[in-house]
Amino acid sequence: MTADPTSPMRPRRFQASGPLRGRIRVPGDKSISHRAIMLSSLAVGESRISGLLEGEDVLATAAAMRAMGAHVERVGTGDWMVNGVGVGALLQPETALDMGNSGTSTRLLMGLVASHPIQATFTGDASLSKRPMGRVIEPLSQMGADIAASAGGRLPLILRGASPAVPIQYRLPVASAQVKSAVLLAGLNTPGQTTVIEPVPTRDHSERMLKGFGADLMVDVDPNGTRVITLSGQAELKPQTIDVPGDPSSAAFFVVAALIVEGSDVIIENVGLNPTRSALFDVLRQMGGSIDEIDRREVGGEPVADLRVRHSTLRGIEVDPAVAPSMIDEFPALFVAASVAQGRTVTTGLDELRVKESDRLAAMASALTLAGARIEEREDGLIIDGTGGAPLSGNSREPIVTHLDHRIAMSMAIAGMASSQGIEIDDTRPIATSFPTFESLLDTLADEVAA
Ligand SMILES: O=C(O)C1=C[C@@H](OP(=O)(O)O)[C@@H](O)[C@H](O)C1
Ligand SMILES: C=C(OP(=O)(O)O)C(=O)O
């Protein structure tokens, strides 16, 4: 079940706000939710998942796993029960798998199908159909899968899995957790050892969760930091009980909003702080942001804490490109913070942002420029000269174009809260892909101000 592409666009103006105060909880982590549904669907027996993100992207994954034979059932808000089919026993889906807007669903499920004796057609919305799939087609073809893609290695595509698949040793040519995970998931039903060599570390939820489900997986880190991940295939996965921590990529919008709206003091509970995901919070602290961790603990095998965030005077910095993979989805929110900071923020090494749900460098450069910020777009990053704490002017004539990209929509929504005349965006519908409760949480914090 994904958004109906024929439903009308839903524009909205996000207005300047008084101080944000209160306590909120963001929904479950999207990356972990996808993986929880997929691995539970391959385990033999019943897994229980709590705190699952019920966003459209994860629902697309759930629907696909059902279409391939798993029993995936919602038993309460965020509470799901999954009865898996066992590694090697996925069924051929009868109809095309509609991946909606979700790159993670597409690339990881391509990995799963690649080593099963089945054929699947993958389709997606207008945004997903522009995104490059060659990065997974290449290693999965080496493993024996037969893939017929649309021009430029894009969706729609038909994938016929190999049985038995061929184990490979694959060095990632691009820092991508989706490519890493696609190869590892294909390795689950491949005889022998499948190895992924990762020169630049990316989010490691697949590795953590595969181990949690009992897979035989080893991670070695060589002296120059390269990670070598080896999975022995065709082992049985054991059902698990998984508690999904809050999504740091969703928390990011409220962290930035609280930092830039004067007088704000907000607590965001249960935020995942896996070091391969949390670089935004370190960067914002370097910029002078007041972000305190309260009660650091573990949830579902991942570090979490409550974050207390207070309005702060932010200063521009040069962001180290080495941290980019650990905050890859958070740059749109960072660009908003930089637009109202003192001085210049320079970002580099962000070529990957051009192949997300939209070209996020181009989309954010034109959105923020329209809202009155001073932005220079470079090939691999943005240079931003902040207002020094003054509000952005906002836009009055044309709405911001969000290009079916939830993170552009949410970033410009929070920019609207630090603008004098508000910011109108053309479409809020894509927000439901990752954060269906975003607008109601934002309105709750603003209501608490009015009260
Ligand atoms: O593995 C994942 O869950 C994800 C990996 C990242 O993509 P890439 O692997 O393309 O960098 C990220 O942008 C995406 O939102 C989720
Ligand atoms: C890039 C993203 O997701 P995906 O690749 O799964 O579409 C994102 O959520 O920002």
Image: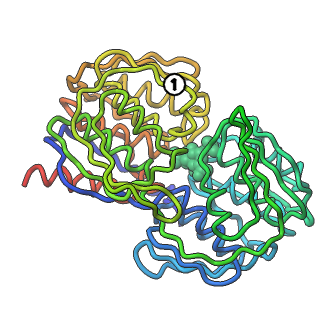
Residue on which disc 1 sits: 320
Q: Nearer the viewer, residue 122 or 271?
A: 271
* Relative horizontal placement of residue 413, taking residue 264 as reference (left or right): right
- Which quarter of the rendered picture does the C terminus lie within? bottom left
Q: Is residue 349 visible?
A: yes
* Relative horizontal placement of residue 101, taking residue 162 as reference (left or right): left
Farthest residue in the left direction? 451
* Relative horizontal placement of residue 234, taking residue 24 as reference (left or right): right
Res 396 → quadrant: top left
Instruction: Report x, y in % for residue 151.
Output: 77, 40
Instruction: Report x, y in % for residue 329.
Output: 50, 41
| Label 1 beta carbon within 8 A of ligand 1 | no
Farthest residue in the front direction? 223
* Relative horizontal placement of residue 414, taking residue 126 as reference (left or right): left
Residue displayed at 71% across by 58% down: 122
Residue displayed at 46% across by 66% down: 54
What is the tally of numbered marks visible in this picture? 1
Mark 1 lies on a secondary structure that is: loop
Residue displayed at 83% across by 47% down: 139
Q: Nearer the viewer, residue 298 or 2?
A: 298
Residue displayed at 53% across by 17% down: 378
Q: Is residue 125 visible?
A: no
- From this view, report whether residue 416 is shown above or below residue 303: above
Q: What's the amino acid at mark 1?
A: Asp
Instruction: Report x, y in % for residue 432.
Output: 43, 56
